[in-house]
Image: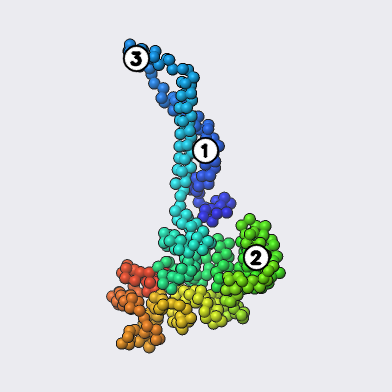
Amino acid sequence: RNYQSPALDELREVPLSWQIILFYCYFPACAAVVVFRQGIARAANSFWQSVRVTKPSRKTGKDRKRDKKQKKVSHEESVVEQSSAFNWRRWTAGTILLLTLPAAIGLYTLDRNTKTLSKIQYCSEHQMWNDVLVNARRLPLSLYLSSYVNHDVNLALYHTGQMPYEMFLYPQTKPYWAIFEFNDLPVQQIIKPCDLYLELGRVGEAEHMAMELLDMQPTGGALKRMALVKMIKGQIPAATVFLNVLQDDMVWGRWAQEYLQRLAKDPELSSDPEIQRIRGLMITEDDLEQTTIYFPDGSKSNYVAMLHNQLEQNGRNQMAFEYYMAQCLVIGNLKNVVDAFPLLDNFSYPSIPPVYEEAAMIYGSVTQGEIEERPSGVFFRDYKISEPTLARCQSFMEILRRYDGFNKKAEPEIARAVGGSYFHYFYLMKCGDAR
């Protein structure tokens, strides 16, 4: 079932149009042309011959003499020649029709945005992170906010080392759940956070998602995630059950067989770097009560608290750190951002990433005593702010002063001066237009 177009059982809910009808006729049309190609070619050839029939013209004496000479050509050669001409025309007509009809339908129903979405999905699943970003730049704003694109872009930014540098060059969602939940098909709402939780080291949450996925869509992918969770948690008998079932799967069968062989030799999987990495990131104490927000009609996860607790238990989890900072930036919780600055020393950033500097300057502009000018430069809590960030901050503040604060009329000038920075995103958020 393709997520990119309405399925047949959903057509009653989708307004029909000629484009949708032709889209579903595309593949039957291709098949029909292939099956009836010979008949179509013969009909085209007959039409071709009828068009070429002309009235005979009057012949002179010279023409009659030339005709007598040509009669010396054998009857067999003439038949062969006619047969060759007929076959060539039939092949040409059939080939043109074979290519033209499906191509016309395909071009008419082509949706370039849907094609780009497919590329992003594929590249993300195969960890082709640079290609994710290249394709994401081609999408309109609306598709970032209505699908999984925002999630895949942030994941690609993290894996390419650009999350604290280029995050706001791409549209970001604003709600408090921000980068962890998706307006997409139910299966994608489970698969993507499940994989993200695993990579972050939140194995308990990943297991819950994997069980829900197994119940909703019992496929090889769901079995693979359950087996992986059980192996990470050291529950080898349970993992073996899932792997034994999975080894008959066409896609993940070989993967399951390899892990069954590894478990037979090394039940702890001590030589598996990815298993060991995730085990090292797992929390040691249950924090469900701290990471849940309760509402009258249910509950939601508090992702800020979830990542913060994980950093308290392991301050060197760089992915948890960057996602924590990103989550706080998106919802405008600047105090949490600047309070996490001491953790910067745990990672190998050459200097404070500009996105974090920009957040610090905004926070310092409304909080006394946070920013200090010294002979060697401008400092925020003893962290020196770079000159490019100071220049952007100055331009941003000057525009705000000219427009008496966060005025929507300043948008074009703000975009030209500091577009793609956190200054720009913060301005949009204050104006109620964050994206």
The crowd level at tag 3 (other Cα within 10 Å; few <14, some 14-19, many 20+) is few
Between residues 67 and 180, which one lies in front from this camera angle? 67
State the image coordinates of residue 412 (x, y, percent, origin top left). Answer: 32, 67
Residue hosting label 3: 63
Amino acid on which disc 3 is placed: Asp
The crowd level at tag 1 (other Cα within 10 Å; few <14, some 14-19, many 20+) is many
| Label 2 secondary element | helix
State the image coordinates of residue 393 (x, y, percent, origin top left). Answer: 33, 77
How many marks the image carries: the answer is: 3
Between residues 307 and 342, which one lies in front from this camera angle? 342
State the image coordinates of residue 154 (x, y, percent, origin top left). Answer: 47, 68
Cα distance between the residues tagged 3 and 2? 87 Å
Residue 328 can be seen in this image: no
- Residue 415 position by quadrant: bottom left
Between residues 75 and 220, which one lies in front from this camera angle? 75
Residue at image location 63% in from the left, 69% down from the top: 229
* Comparing labels 1 and 3, the label whose residue is closer to the camera: 3
- Give the side of residue 1 with respect to residue 390, left or right: right
- Residue 196 position by quadrant: bottom right
**Could you tell which of marks 1 and 2 lies nearer the N-terminus?**
1
| Label 3 secondary element | helix
Residue 106 can be seen in this image: yes
Residue at image location 47% in from the left, 70% down from the top: 158
- Give the side of residue 349 with respect to residue 31, left or right: left
Amino acid on which disc 1 is placed: Val
Residue hosting label 1: 33
**Could you tell which of marks 1 and 3 lies nearer the N-terminus?**
1
Residue hosting label 2: 259
Colouring mode (rainbow / by chain / secondary structure / one colour)? rainbow
